[in-house]
Image: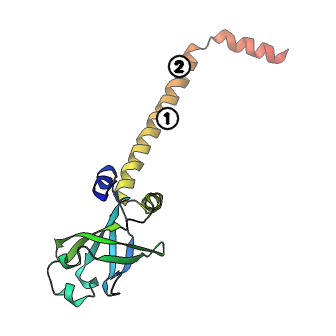
Amino acid sequence: MDQQENRANKFRKAISQVDVLNVKNVASGEVYFSRAMLVDVSPTGLLLRVERENILSMGLRSTLTLSSIIGTSVGFTIEVMDTYLEGAVTRTKLEGHGTFVVAVDFREDAPEYWRNCLVDLLPADAEGLEIIEDEIDESEESYEQEDEDLEDDEDEDKDPDDDEKDEEDLLD
C-alpha cells in the first residue's frame, strides 16, 4: 500500500501542547527550526506549526515560503517523550503573521504498529477532551435517571402483604 492510499484510510488526531526540538536536515545536519509545535498526527505523518522567530536557517528566514525544503529528509526530537524521529517534508504553507505549517511523513521503513502507538501516546487536544467529557456527563445523568425510574417501578410493583410475610419469616 503506498503512502497516498494509507493516508486516505487513516485518521488524524489533533495534539495539544507538544513541542519538537531542532528540526534539522538529516543529510547536511543544518538545523532549520529550533522549536516547532505538533498540530496533529496520523499513522502516516505529522503536522508542525513553526513561528518565524524559531527559524534558524538564514536561507529560510529571509523568504516568505518554506517550499525549498519540500522533499528534504528531516529529523527532530519530541520534547516530552525524548524521542528522535525522522521523515520527509511533503508540504509547507504560510498561515500568516510569521506562522508556517510543515507536513512531515514518517520514513517508509518505520513499522506501522510503531506509528499507530505514537498516535495513541500523544495527548489529544483539550477541545476534543471537553467534548468527550460532556458526552460522559450526559450519559451519567441518563443512567442516574434510569436508576431512579427503576426504583420507583420496584416500589409500585411490590405488594404490602409481602413486607409482612418477610418480617414473619425473619422472626421465625
Q: Position of residue 63 (x, y in %)?
A: 15, 83
Rendered position, 98 above or below 4: below
Q: CA distance from mark 1 to mark 2?
A: 14 Å
Q: Which mark is residue 99?
A: none
Of the pair 113 and 16, the residue shown nearer to us? 113
Q: Could you tell which of marks 1 and 2 lies nearer the N-terminus?
A: 1
Residue lying at the far left of the rendered structure: 64
Residue 97's quadrant in the figure? bottom left
Q: Position of residue 112 (x, y in %)?
A: 44, 58
Q: Position of residue 25 (x, y in %)?
A: 32, 82
Residue kind at label 1, given as amino acid type:
Glu
Left of 137 or right of it: where is 156? right
Which quadrant holds the C terminus? top right
Of the pair 102 and 155, the residue shown nearer to us? 102
Is label 1 in a helix, a strand or a loop? helix
Mark 2 neighbour density, 10 Å: few (under 14) some (14–19) many (20 or more): few
Mark 1 neighbour density, 10 Å: few (under 14) some (14–19) many (20 or more): few
Is label 2 in a helix, a strand or a loop? helix
Rendered position, 117 above or below 148: below
Write the residue at 44% across / 34% down: 142
Q: Which mark is residue 144?
A: 1
Q: Position of residue 98 (x, y in %)?
A: 19, 78
Write the residue at 80% across / 18% down: 170
